[in-house]
Amino acid sequence: MLKSVRLFFYYLCCKPLRMKKIYAFLASLALPLVIVAQIPPGYYNSATGLSGPALQMALHNIIKAHNSVSYSSLWTHFQTTDKKPSGKVWDIYSDVPSGTPPYQFTFGTDQCAGYSGEADCYNREHSWPQSWFSSATIPSSDLFHIYPTDGYVNNKRSNYPYGTVGTPMWTSLNGSKLGYCVDPGYGSTVFEPIDEYKGDVARSYFYMSTRYLTEDGSWSTSFATNKSVILPWEASVLLNWSHMDPVSTKEIDRNNDIYGIQNNRNPFIDHPEWADSIWAMIVTGFEKEIASNLSVDVYPNPSNETFYVSNESRSNLTVELKICNALGQVIADHASVELMALNSNFYTIDCSAWDKGIYYITIVEKQKVKTLKFIKM
């Protein structure tokens, strides 16, 4: 009951708030023991009281080494994890929770063998595209990010990131959109599901980033990710989506069903507040980078040995430099750094011993703050 009450108050703080999810959640309170009983006693004990990177690592250790199922078995597992009360396929790319879906699929009968248009069949959608993790075997069949979806819509989505579309270049029958992104930090093509499923895909991404933390050596990069790390612009989008579309009864049931299959859980469905604890710092730094007018820069960027911090303003600056990795962990802190005006001197930072990846250099001067993304090659 305590978990249910905690989630209820978390939902009340989320905005904008859709009443249908409140009603669904209130209905679930009538049987709180059914929900709580699905989480083994002490399952999250090692994460209690932690925050930020330490919390994410603790959660990784809890949910790693799950029971990996075969890719072919997903067709059968979907009949447990993604079945509507009517028995039809719960397809997030065609469903309309607030109205009548334009079409519905039947398990088995409508399984894809080929398609020429929307409503032909359903297939297996990797919300975190396979190309982003180099089609590694275990994440290729991890149910927490794979959904049964319309094959044609899945193909339209391709491996584009999720994001907010401005003017759509294509719209599905349920209102999912493909088009250029209007979110700060990215301006190319993205796919936007309908509002009722934005939180679902956001929590799938939070799961993937956490489940495969430190196990992503073979993974690739994308416009939204660096291996298992979610880039700040995408993290900002997903964190906002997780707030506007709170955990639904559908997600809770799906979490419980997948636990019965894989023997692990999505912590961000059980504890949605943990997403803020882990990603809010990264998002805040990104937003400062977008907004700040502090005239400093770093170059060369990327670099693999050293890089320089320069002052491009007309006045001398005394700044503090703080460098964090992609998880928000501070790896260097430089206080009282003198930067002469108009690039007449540079502050040199040795990055030769750093791991390859993305870093954030926060530069503070009085009330001005600027965060710059740096890539170590």
Image: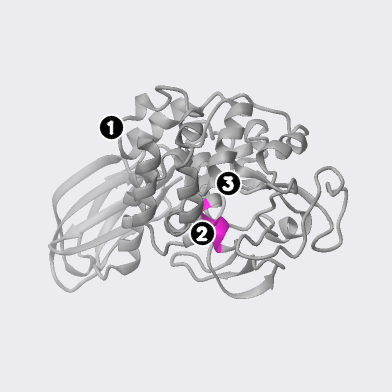
**Label 3 packing within 10 angstroms: few (<14), some (14-19), many (20+):** some
| Mark 3 to mark 2 CA distance (whole Å) | 12 Å
Mark 1 or 2, nearer chain start:
2
Q: How many marks?
A: 3
> Residue 250, which numbered label?
3
Near-viewer residue (311 or 55): 55
238, above or below 33, in the image: below
> Magenta stretch: dominant SS?
helix
Residue 314 occupies which quadrant of the picture? Answer: bottom left
Marks 3 and 1: CB-CB under 8 Å?
Answer: no
Label 1: few (<14), some (14–19) or many (≥20) C-alpha neighbours in 10 Å: few
> Which of the numbered marks, if any, corresponds to residue 197?
none
Q: Whole-Å distance between the Cαs marked 3 and 1?
A: 28 Å
Tell me the quarter of the picture where residue 65 sits. top right
Image quarter (top left, top right, bottom left or bottom right) of the N terminus: top left
What residue is pinned by disc 2?
20
Residue stretch rendered in magenta on the structure:
195-199
Q: Kindly identify the residue that appears in the image at 69 percent across and 56 percent down.
A: 158
Which residue is the site of mark 1?
Answer: 49
Q: Is residue 347 magenta?
A: no
Amino acid identity at mark 2? Lys
- Element marked by disc 3: helix
> Residue placed at 72% from the left, 49% from the top?
86
Nearer-N-terminus badge (3/2): 2
